[in-house]
Image (cartoon, rainbow, N blue to C red):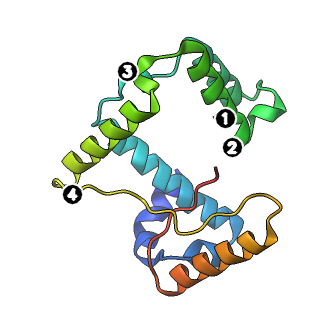
Amino acid sequence: RFARALLPRMALQVGPGDLLARGYDEAMSLILGEIEQAVDQAQMYALQVACVPSSVLLEHFQGIADGTAPQHHLNWHGLVGLRIRDSWKTRHEGLIWLDDKVEQVHRTAELCGGDHLHLPILAHAELGDAAALDKLRSVVSGLVAEQRPIAVKPR
């Protein structure tokens, strides 16, 4: 695949903010290459039973993959909505927030040599809050300028 072939020789050149300087196709190829590598690595870890998608959710995912899903399922909010709706309907006890977070902290510590790690929320902005969005942009730009790693997560 193009993304996998491109990634090894470009990986050392990719740094904070670098994707913003690339064209869309090249940036997407790098992102897809990273995702493929993550999926390959994930096969070494067991998925918690509560996180295994239900048959109903798998049908939705199949529809997305083969192009037969409704348009409103084809974005981040649509996917999150499907997962939330499924977890609400199945009410799997392993998806209780406290248990999930406690287990997540414990498992992360195991994988990271005993260190308790978390991703801090350095900035956030709600839709329509121009001042918060300006602050978010400022914080992200500063981190990129300092070449510090960041994760941007839609909520």
Q: Residue at x 22, y 54 (%)?
A: 112
Q: Amino acid at mark 2?
A: Trp
122 vs 84: above or below: below
List the residue tagged with mark 4.
Answer: 115
Q: Earlier in the sequence, mark 3 or mark 1?
A: 3
**Front-lying residue, 9 or 67:** 67
The answer to which image quadrant residue 70 occupies is top right
Q: Residue at x 72, y 70 (%)?
A: 132
List the residue tagged with mark 1.
Answer: 79
* CA distance separating discs 4 and 2: 31 Å
List the residue tagged with mark 2.
Answer: 76
Q: Residue at x 54, y 80 (%)?
A: 144
Q: Secondary structure at mark 2?
A: helix
Q: Amino acid at mark 4?
A: Asp
The answer to which image quadrant residue 17 occupies is bottom right
The answer to which image quadrant residue 28 occupies is bottom right
* CA distance separating discs 1 and 4: 32 Å
Q: Earlier in the sequence, mark 4 or mark 2?
A: 2
User: What mark, if any, has residue 49 been given in the picture?
Assistant: 3
Q: Circle 2: is it few (<14), some (14-19), or many (20+) Cα within 10 Å?
A: few
User: What mark, if any, has residue 143 been given in the picture?
Assistant: none
Q: Earlier in the sequence, mark 2 or mark 3?
A: 3
Most distant residue in the left direction: 113
**Label 3 with label 1: CB-CB less than 8 Å:** no
**Front-lying residue, 38 or 112:** 112
Q: Circle 3: is it few (<14), some (14-19), or many (20+) Cα within 10 Å?
A: few
Q: Amino acid at mark 1?
A: Leu
* CA distance separating discs 2 and 1: 5 Å
* CA distance separating discs 4 and 3: 25 Å
**Label 2 with label 1: CB-CB less than 8 Å:** yes
**Front-lying residue, 6 or 76:** 76
